[in-house]
Amino acid sequence: MNKEENGIFIKLLEIGEEKGANGITKTQALNRLGELGLMPTSSYDLAEQLFFECFDFGGKTIGYEGRCALKAEYYFRLLEYRELKEARQTAKQANRNAIFAIILAIATLLVTVLMPLFTTLPTGP
Protein backbone atom coordinates (compact mmCIF):
# COMPACT_ATOMS: atom_id res chain seq x y z
CA MET A 1 0.00 0.00 0.00
CA ASN A 2 1.30 3.43 -0.83
CA LYS A 3 1.00 6.38 1.54
CA GLU A 4 -2.31 7.64 0.07
CA GLU A 5 -3.90 4.18 0.24
CA ASN A 6 -2.63 3.75 3.80
CA GLY A 7 -4.16 7.10 4.84
CA ILE A 8 -7.53 6.20 3.35
CA PHE A 9 -7.44 2.71 4.88
CA ILE A 10 -6.55 3.86 8.39
CA LYS A 11 -9.02 6.74 8.33
CA LEU A 12 -11.78 4.40 7.12
CA LEU A 13 -11.03 2.06 10.02
CA GLU A 14 -11.10 5.00 12.44
CA ILE A 15 -14.47 6.11 11.05
CA GLY A 16 -15.79 2.57 11.54
CA GLU A 17 -14.46 2.45 15.09
CA GLU A 18 -16.00 5.83 15.84
CA LYS A 19 -19.46 4.65 14.72
CA GLY A 20 -19.16 1.41 16.68
CA ALA A 21 -21.94 -1.18 16.59
CA ASN A 22 -24.41 1.37 15.18
CA GLY A 23 -22.52 1.18 11.92
CA ILE A 24 -22.32 3.54 9.00
CA THR A 25 -23.49 3.49 5.41
CA LYS A 26 -21.06 3.41 2.51
CA THR A 27 -22.22 6.86 1.40
CA GLN A 28 -21.69 8.35 4.86
CA ALA A 29 -18.22 6.80 5.14
CA LEU A 30 -17.11 8.02 1.71
CA ASN A 31 -18.55 11.49 2.36
CA ARG A 32 -16.63 11.62 5.66
CA LEU A 33 -13.41 10.72 3.82
CA GLY A 34 -14.18 13.55 1.38
CA GLU A 35 -14.64 16.01 4.25
CA LEU A 36 -11.21 15.00 5.52
CA GLY A 37 -9.66 15.66 2.12
CA LEU A 38 -8.80 12.01 1.53
CA MET A 39 -11.06 11.39 -1.45
CA PRO A 40 -9.59 12.67 -4.69
CA THR A 41 -11.57 11.43 -7.68
CA SER A 42 -8.96 8.80 -8.49
CA SER A 43 -9.34 7.29 -5.01
CA TYR A 44 -13.11 6.77 -5.04
CA ASP A 45 -12.93 3.21 -6.36
CA LEU A 46 -10.15 2.35 -3.92
CA ALA A 47 -12.10 3.74 -0.96
CA GLU A 48 -15.22 1.88 -2.07
CA GLN A 49 -13.28 -1.40 -2.33
CA LEU A 50 -11.75 -0.82 1.10
CA PHE A 51 -15.19 -0.14 2.55
CA PHE A 52 -16.56 -3.39 1.15
CA GLU A 53 -13.54 -5.27 2.52
CA CYS A 54 -13.54 -3.75 6.02
CA PHE A 55 -17.22 -3.58 6.90
CA ASP A 56 -19.66 -6.37 7.69
CA PHE A 57 -22.88 -6.35 5.69
CA GLY A 58 -24.58 -8.97 7.82
CA GLY A 59 -24.87 -11.46 4.96
CA LYS A 60 -26.33 -8.91 2.56
CA THR A 61 -24.95 -8.28 -0.93
CA ILE A 62 -22.13 -5.86 -1.61
CA GLY A 63 -24.56 -3.33 -3.15
CA TYR A 64 -26.31 -3.03 0.22
CA GLU A 65 -26.76 0.61 1.27
CA GLY A 66 -27.78 0.06 4.90
CA ARG A 67 -25.64 0.49 7.99
CA CYS A 68 -22.56 -1.70 8.25
CA ALA A 69 -20.30 -2.20 11.24
CA LEU A 70 -16.54 -2.55 11.12
CA LYS A 71 -15.41 -6.19 11.02
CA ALA A 72 -13.66 -7.35 14.20
CA GLU A 73 -10.59 -8.37 12.18
CA TYR A 74 -10.13 -4.81 10.94
CA TYR A 75 -10.79 -3.33 14.36
CA PHE A 76 -7.88 -5.40 15.66
CA ARG A 77 -5.75 -4.32 12.71
CA LEU A 78 -6.41 -0.72 13.71
CA LEU A 79 -5.34 -1.50 17.28
CA GLU A 80 -2.17 -3.19 16.00
CA TYR A 81 -1.42 -0.16 13.82
CA ARG A 82 -1.75 2.15 16.81
CA GLU A 83 0.48 -0.09 18.93
CA LEU A 84 3.10 -0.16 16.18
CA LYS A 85 2.95 3.63 15.85
CA GLU A 86 3.37 4.01 19.62
CA ALA A 87 6.25 1.52 19.65
CA ARG A 88 8.03 3.48 16.93
CA GLN A 89 7.66 6.70 18.92
CA THR A 90 8.95 4.97 22.05
CA ALA A 91 11.93 3.57 20.12
CA LYS A 92 12.78 7.04 18.78
CA GLN A 93 12.67 8.45 22.30
CA ALA A 94 14.84 5.60 23.59
CA ASN A 95 17.41 6.33 20.87
CA ARG A 96 17.46 10.01 21.83
CA ASN A 97 17.92 9.09 25.49
CA ALA A 98 20.73 6.68 24.63
CA ILE A 99 22.56 9.31 22.58
CA PHE A 100 22.19 11.81 25.42
CA ALA A 101 23.58 9.25 27.90
CA ILE A 102 26.56 8.52 25.65
CA ILE A 103 27.34 12.22 25.25
CA LEU A 104 27.04 12.72 29.01
CA ALA A 105 29.37 9.77 29.66
CA ILE A 106 31.96 11.14 27.21
CA ALA A 107 31.77 14.59 28.79
CA THR A 108 32.20 13.10 32.26
CA LEU A 109 35.19 11.08 31.10
CA LEU A 110 36.82 14.15 29.54
CA VAL A 111 36.29 16.19 32.70
CA THR A 112 37.72 13.37 34.82
CA VAL A 113 40.81 13.05 32.62
CA LEU A 114 41.43 16.75 32.05
CA MET A 115 40.66 18.07 35.54
CA PRO A 116 43.97 16.96 37.09
CA LEU A 117 45.88 18.77 34.33
CA PHE A 118 44.41 22.12 35.28
CA THR A 119 44.59 21.88 39.03
CA THR A 120 47.78 22.71 40.83
CA LEU A 121 49.04 20.79 43.75
CA PRO A 122 49.81 22.87 46.82
CA THR A 123 53.51 23.30 47.46
CA GLY A 124 54.96 22.76 50.90
CA PRO A 125 56.38 25.62 53.09
Image: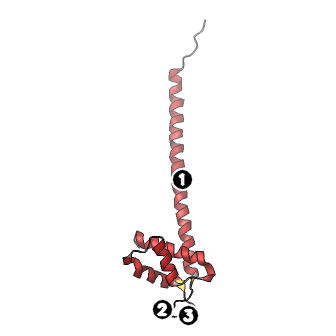
Q: Residue at x 55, y 57 (%)?
A: 90
Q: Look at the image and tell me in which quarter the N terminus lies.
A: bottom left
Closest to the camera, between mark 1 and mark 3, is: 3
Q: Quadrant of residue 119?
A: top right
Q: Residue at x 51, y 29 (%)?
A: 113
Q: CA distance from mark 1 to mark 2?
A: 47 Å
Of the image marks 1 and 3, the number of the one nearer the N terminus: 3
Q: Residue at x 50, y 75 (%)?
A: 32
Of the image marks 1 and 2, the number of the one nearer the N terminus: 2
Residue type at tag 3:
Gly
Q: Look at the image and tell me in which quarter the C terminus lies.
A: top right
Q: Residues within 10 Å of mark 2 (few under 14, many from 20)?
A: few
Where disc 1 sits, the SS reads helix
The residue beneath circle 3 is 59
Residue type at tag 2:
Gly
Which percent across, then down, holds residue 97? 54, 48
Which mark is drawn over residue 93?
1
The residue beneath circle 2 is 63
Instruction: Tell me: residue 43, above or below residue 102.
Output: below
Tell me, yes or no, whether the two marked residues, 1 and 3, touch with CB atoms within 8 Å.
no
Residue nearest the viewer, comparing 77 with 6 = 6
Q: CA distance from mark 1 to mark 3?
A: 46 Å
Which percent across, then down, holds residue 100? 52, 44
Q: Residue at x 54, y 44 (%)?
A: 101
Q: Residues within 10 Å of mark 3 (few under 14, many from 20)?
A: few
Residue type at tag 1:
Gln
